[in-house]
Image (cartoon, rainbow, N blue to C red):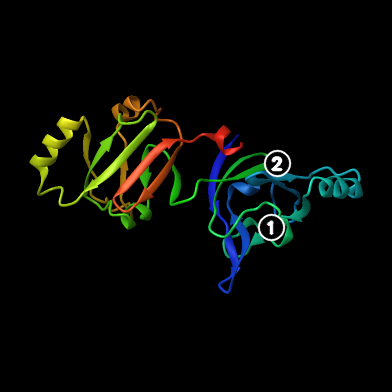
Amino acid sequence: MNGIYLTSVTRKNKSTNSPKLTFFAEWLVHMGFVPGALVQFLPEPGGLSLILCEYVPKYSELFHSTKEKGGTLIHANLNRQKGYACFSIEGAALNSTGLCFGDALLARYEPGFIRLRKLPAGNVKVVTAKLFGQWLEEIGFLAEAVFTVDAQAHPGLITCQLQENGLERSLELVRHARKNKLALLQVPAILPKNCYPMFEIPPACLERAGLAGDEYFLALYEHGRIQLQKLDFVGLGF
């Protein structure tokens, strides 16, 4: 598939947890999902699919076949604030998927087709070996913060552990890293062109964990800790 996209299930309003799925992106138009396009919405185990309906010989046949599959027909909309195509799905159609408010979803897309699947519960992101964003700041990985990288405790898993007062404990941490075969890294200072922290997992660490630098990873995170693992598309239902 052409690309991936991360979104989440929101709610209709603060007084109810009734789920609502709203997402917009520039790539929607490039995939054929222009505002007003007719789209087949199909609920599936752990998520849903959106299929572009460009050529419809008989609308009634499409309507009934979609209904038989438990789906419905919707239209892509226009997000006037951003100027992008968007989808906003709620009510019975979304309820039939079993998705709930707060669920994180991963979308894979190609021309005319989008499939979304629920990600594991918790704080999750889909990342590459180059990690970047405000979320790093929020969990303590600030500019110049020191952290260890464990790439061999468990195959296919990399654990980044923040080390408090790392600069003051440099000698202690160097000995600790050598003893436990860890990599010792520091978040680079934020450059003028960047707004948020950024760091990259070294190729040697990826190799030790049996991971490749050009892969996408699932990042499970909490304050002071990030765990990276290979994104298992088949296991997620793609």
**Residue at screen point 63% across, 48% down:** 28
Q: Estimate the x, y position of residue 154 in percent, counting from the top left.
A: 35, 31
Which SS class for mark 2?
loop
Q: Does dot 1 land on a helix, a strand or a loop? A: helix
How far from the left and from the top, in percent, is residue 72? Answer: 78, 53
Residue 217 lies, with reference to residue 165, above or below; the image says above
The quarter of the rendered structure image containing the C terminus is: top right
Which three-letter amino acid code belongs to the residue tagged 1? Asn
Q: Is residue 98 left or right of residue 142?
A: right
What residue do we see at 26% from left, 53% from top? 142
Give 85 or 174, whichever is nearer the viewer: 174
What crowding class fits label 2: few (fewer than 14 Cα within 10 Å), some (14-19), or many (20 or more)?
some
Residue 159 in picture, x, y percent from top left:
32, 39
Place residue 116 in its image quadrant: top right
Which kind of residue does numbered mark 2 sit on?
A: Gly
- State which tag comes first along the sequence, 2 or 1: 1
Drawn side of residue 147 relative to residue 154, left or right? left
Using the image, determine if residue 230 lies above or below residue 134.
Answer: above
Q: Quadrant of the N terminus?
A: top right
The residue pinned by badge 2 equals 112
Number of residues whose C-alpha sits closer than 10 Å to that of mark 1, classed few (under 14), some (14–19) or many (20 or more): some
Which mark is drawn over residue 116? none
Q: Is residue 200 left or right of residue 185?
A: right
Circle 1 is placed at which residue position? Answer: 95
Tag in front: 2 or 1: 1
Spot occupied by residue 216 in the image (x, y as percentages of width and height): 46, 36
Circles 2 and 1: CB atoms closer than 8 Å: no
> What number of labels is visible?
2
- Inter-mark Cα distance, 2 to 1: 24 Å
What residue do we see at 50% from left, 46% from top? 120
Q: Residue at x 8, y 40 (%)?
A: 171
